Image: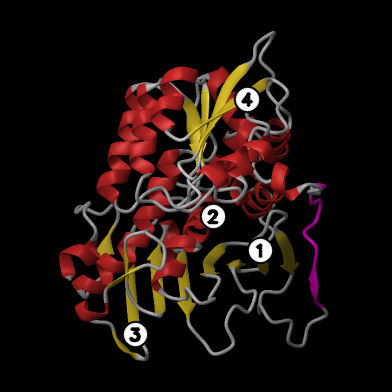
Amino acid sequence: MSMNRRTFLSTASTAALAASLAAPARAQDKKYKACIIGDSDQGGYGHDMHLAFALRDDVALVGLADPNEEGRAKRAAECGAERSYASYQEMLEKEKPDLVAIGPRWTINHKDYLTACVAAGAHGFMEKPLCTDLAEADAMVAMVKEKNLKWSIAFNFRVTPTIAHVKAMIWEKELVGSLLEIRGRGKEDARAGGEDLIVLGTHIFDMMRYFANDPLWCAADITQNGKPATPADVREATEPLGPVLGNRIHAMYGFEKGVAGHFSSMRTKDGDGGRWGIQVLGSKGVISIGTGVEPNVWWLNDSTWNGAGRDSKWERLPEAPAYKVVDQAKERHQILVNDLLAAIEADREPVASLNDGLKSQEMVQAVYEAYTQGRRVALPLEQRDHPLKRWA
């Protein structure tokens, strides 16, 4: 679907969307039963996923599962779970929850967790990245769709009122004029390059899609210590997230109407410089978005993009909604959970769905597909196995 002014205005206004996400959708005289799946030995609970339902007074947290006894006791006490289990399978069988939060950030068991939750008939949401490769992603999206279950992924930035307002400013108000480019960088810490692409790049790609729809193609260049990466450079990530390649990545995506998307991550002696985020560049100016629980957004009203010779400066986005996080641990996932329950009640897809997780994962794997093939590749990708496994 082509994203233009008419397309954007045909949806609910951004203000209405933000309001609906921020306001809890209460079930009349009903309590949802919820469970938490964690593993203190395998990525724990992501970003406080065990507290995901803490601010919903219509959700009863009946169980938490973690094979690590110490971690299980600690997290169960923190979130107030009524019971705790060493086995998530036993917990799902006994508790029969309506909702489940899958916490571990490691992807190696994500498909197994989801399969068990779907068999139990539970809705829920999970930590990103979605999984290890597109074959797994396809299977996960299909199993949820088959049972008409509602599942979200922890793409927190896209559902904040701030980012929804940015989208309105781009398409409704045309604040930056014609959209020309979207530039994103990873966190560029010790994981710079291939691991950064997977872990932090997923958020960048999701926001690119949120603003510009699905990319049509990808081209990429990858180096290891300044030299073209080879099959011998393929390695496992420091956490079990699948194979990775390179400590410098430059990728380019083509979107509709000639809009370009760029992603880069490069290891430097200076480490993380706080550049993780995106810039939306248009014919009239720039919107810069720093990622965080409260996205840090600035606007430059200048078609040169640098303010040279003009009376322009970086300023806050006009008409930006008030969005203040007081308790980060409890509020981080609040809008996602509110939207998930609203999606269950309305029988619609969540705003940040598993399919969005799949699409973001596809943009990750397209980088490796393009580099290993030595050419620009079309999206969606035809081959769904992991390109680096095939190459190495």
Query: Given this view, does label 2 or label 4 mark the residue nearer the observer?
Result: 4
Q: Point out the image quarter for the C terminus.
A: bottom left
Q: Is residue 373 left or right of residue 49?
A: left
Inspect this view and state whether residue 380 appears. yes
For the residue marked with disc 2, what is the amino acid? Met
Is label 3 or label 4 in front?
A: 4
Q: Nearer the viewer, residue 372 or 218?
A: 372
Res 224 label: 3
**Amino acid marked by disc 3:** Gln
**Could you say whether the residue bearing mark 1 is in a helix, strand or loop?**
strand
Along the line of sight, the residue nearer the viewer: 259 or 26: 26
Foreground tag (1 vs 4): 4
Q: Nearer the viewer, residue 355 or 176?
A: 355
Q: Neighbour class for label 4 at 10 Å: few (<14), some, many (≥20)?
A: few
> Residue 342 placed where, x, y %?
61, 24
**Which residue is under mark 4?**
82
Identify the residue shown where x is 79% and y is 48%: 323
Q: Residue at x 39, y 49 (%)?
A: 359
| 271 to 175, vertically: above or below | below
* Dot 3 and dot 4 residues touching (CB under 8 Å): no
Instruction: Give the answer, above or below, for where 234 lies relative to 211.
Output: below
Q: Amino acid at mark 1?
A: Ile
Q: Earlier in the sequence, mark 2 or mark 4?
A: 4
Q: Quadrant of residue 88?
A: top left
Q: CA distance from mark 2 to mark 1?
A: 10 Å
Question: What's drawn in magenta, residue-wise?
Answer: 312-322
Write down the residue under mark 2.
Answer: 207
Give yes or no for contact between labels 2 and 1 (Cβ–Cβ under 8 Å): yes
Front position in the image: 112 or 168:
112
- Residue on which the image places disc 1: 289
